[in-house]
Image: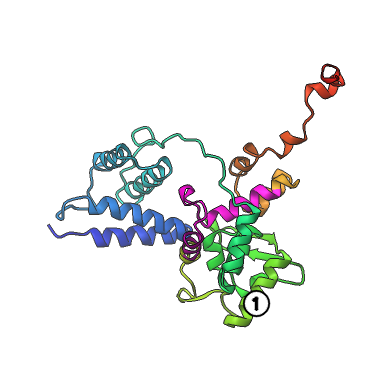
Amino acid sequence: MTNNKTIAIERYRQWLTFRNYAKGTITDYIYCFSGFANSLPEDTDFFNLDVQLAIDYVFRLRSKGLSPASTNLLSSSLRCYYDVILDRPISIRRLPNVKYTLGEPNTFSESEISRLLDVADVRMKAMILLGCDCGLRAGEVARLRVKDIDSENMLLHIVHTKRDKSRYVKLSMPCLQALRTYWLAYRPDPSGYMFPGKVNGHINEIYPSQLFHRLLVKLAIRPEDGLRFHNLRDTYATSLHNNGCDVFSLKKALGHSTLKSTARYIAFSTADIQQMPSPSDFRGNRHGRS
């Protein structure tokens, strides 16, 4: 039997693209399915797969320590392939998602942000401020177009984001100044992307994360915490909430579909708790008098 793995992967990619899945989702789904496909024998017919093969594969990786989030992504990818390519749906009951609770957002302190900005080159400095001052994801930084920067109204237009949505975010003055400094040094095409690359017209979507990781290693900033570019966005969201931004405005700025995603930043915030009175305040603190 001729191996048809390559054909299967390409057909899956075409279907995901046709359905207008986000680029990041397509990359993740193809990566997950390819890992599954590579685990099977060379003579496997990828258009006639048994459901149990997928279930066993996911359970095996989970038993070896695959994280809940990665397990759920893998399960979603395989359920989708079996459903749309093989017309053999796997029920959520047979291949369920793993329940887990999102932990507290890992944020940078002001001193850590200052250290990062002090040593970053002009391009990296602009990227860092797009993350911590504007809340952009790494992929959104990579896809930022020159025309998306509205310096007159101090806004950034973020287009084709996660789940192919668009939003506006406030542009801070330090970020605008950093972008202008970068512009003078690199002179990107005004009709193109702010950070041009050789593929798709812009730099690879994971490139800002790679550059940022190198900077973190260089400065040895909390290596035990596994910090990454996305933690700049966590810092942005937490700072906004701690300084009085309401949950609906925060949801809009972050581009979340539901309040459930935004609630993570509120659940672990202590800003409102610190402003609360204690019972002693109501009692006049009589028992605390000397």
Q: Indicate yes or no whether the magenta region holds residue 182.
A: no
Residue under label 1, please give it. 181
Is 52 located above or below residue 251 in the figure?
above
Q: How is the image coloured?
A: rainbow
At x 71%, y 65%, the residue is 155
Task: Tell me if residue 221 is in the magenta stretch.
Answer: yes
Count residues near mark 1 (Cα–Cα under 10 Å), then give few for <14, some for 14-19, many for 20+: some
The residue located at (79%, 29%) in the rendering is: 277
Kindly tell me whether residue 115 is visible in this rendering: yes
Q: Nearer the viewer, residue 50 or 225?
A: 225
Q: Quadrant of residue 124?
A: bottom right
Residue closest to the eye, 140 or 46? 140
The quadrant in which the C terminus is found is top right
Q: Amino acid at mark 1?
A: Thr
Please tell me whether mark 1 sits on a helix, a strand or a loop. helix
| 279, above or below 61, in the image | above
Tell me the quarter of the image containing the N terminus. Answer: bottom left
Q: Position of residue 204 (x, y in %)?
A: 46, 68
285 relative to 116, above or below: above
> How would you classify the magenta stretch by its main secondary structure?
helix
Q: Would residue 63 be found to the left or right of residue 108 on screen?
A: left
Q: What residue appears at the point 23 percent right and 58 percent down from the top-left corner?
A: 5
| Rendering coords of residue 85 (x, y %) | 32, 52
Residue numbers of the magenta segment: 211-240
